[in-house]
Image (tube, rainbow, N blue to C red):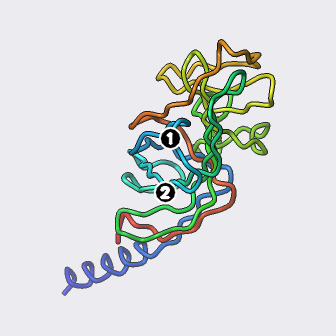
Amino acid sequence: MRVSIILIALSISTAAFAGQTQIAPAYAVIEVTINQPISSETAKVGDRFTTICSATDGTGFPASTVFTGIVTSVIRASGEIPGQVGVAFTDATLPNGSLVNIDGRLTSMNEHDVMRNAQTGFLESRVERRNERSKFIGCSLGTLIGVFNGSVMRGGLIDGSMAWLAEVEVCADNTRHCVVTKDTRFGIVLVRDAAFSNAQND
């Protein structure tokens, strides 16, 4: 009898936890890798692509959550204009199939763009970057995630070194099409809170 009561209590506790609502707060950063390549030579506005988070992070999104992105702008490289691809992230598909609407922007994982919140433990966008709309941008050193204001570009390279380029003056010799290869790592910044049911225990 005692064993049955304990089992029932555990079942109720587990069910309650399974239905718990998670809140991923605005400006939290989710680290993902991309499933398809993107190039400023061939991309078109409206193209969709997917990314996946490889591990559960502090935001509550479980490992293997798939985040859908959409191409919002494309500029082909020409002269002193680097190739550029703007993207946004619209939804997340949890491992149990649940769909969560999100409003996400692109960020590099460079320490100039993101930091770990000492209180919550998860990554978040630095305050000075929160109003920026970073893009994929091509340059002679590779593709960076950052901003271009018409004369200089700044951002973090995505070649694996995560090197930071600070206010690089643009000339025809250092502009290229941007190329984002499959499995490239970067971050998604949530523009507003995202609420979803805990899927790890469903």
* Residue tagged 2: 68
Considering the image in quadrants, where does the C terminus appear? bottom left
Q: Residue 72's x, y, as percent?
A: 63, 52
Name the amino acid, label 2.
Thr
Q: Which residue is mark 1?
A: 42
Work out whether 50 lies above or below 155.
Answer: below
**As shown in the figure, which amino acid type bears the numbered disc 1?**
Thr
Q: Is residue 113 left or right of residue 32?
A: right
Disc with the residue nearer the chain's start (1 vs 2)? 1
- Is the residue 182 above or below the residue 82 in the image? below
Please state the horizontal and vertical placement of residue 158, each as a whole percent of the image.
52, 27
At 67% from the left edge and 19% from the top edge, which residue is drawn? 165
The picture places residue 123, in percent across and down from the top left corner, at 59, 41
Looking at the image, residue 65 sits to the left or right of residue 157; the answer is left
For this orientation, the residue located farthest to the bottom is 1
- In the image, is residue 46 above or below residue 112? below
User: Tag 1, which secondary structure?
Assistant: loop
Q: Nearer the viewer, residue 192 or 142?
A: 142
Q: Nearer the viewer, residue 99 or 171?
A: 171
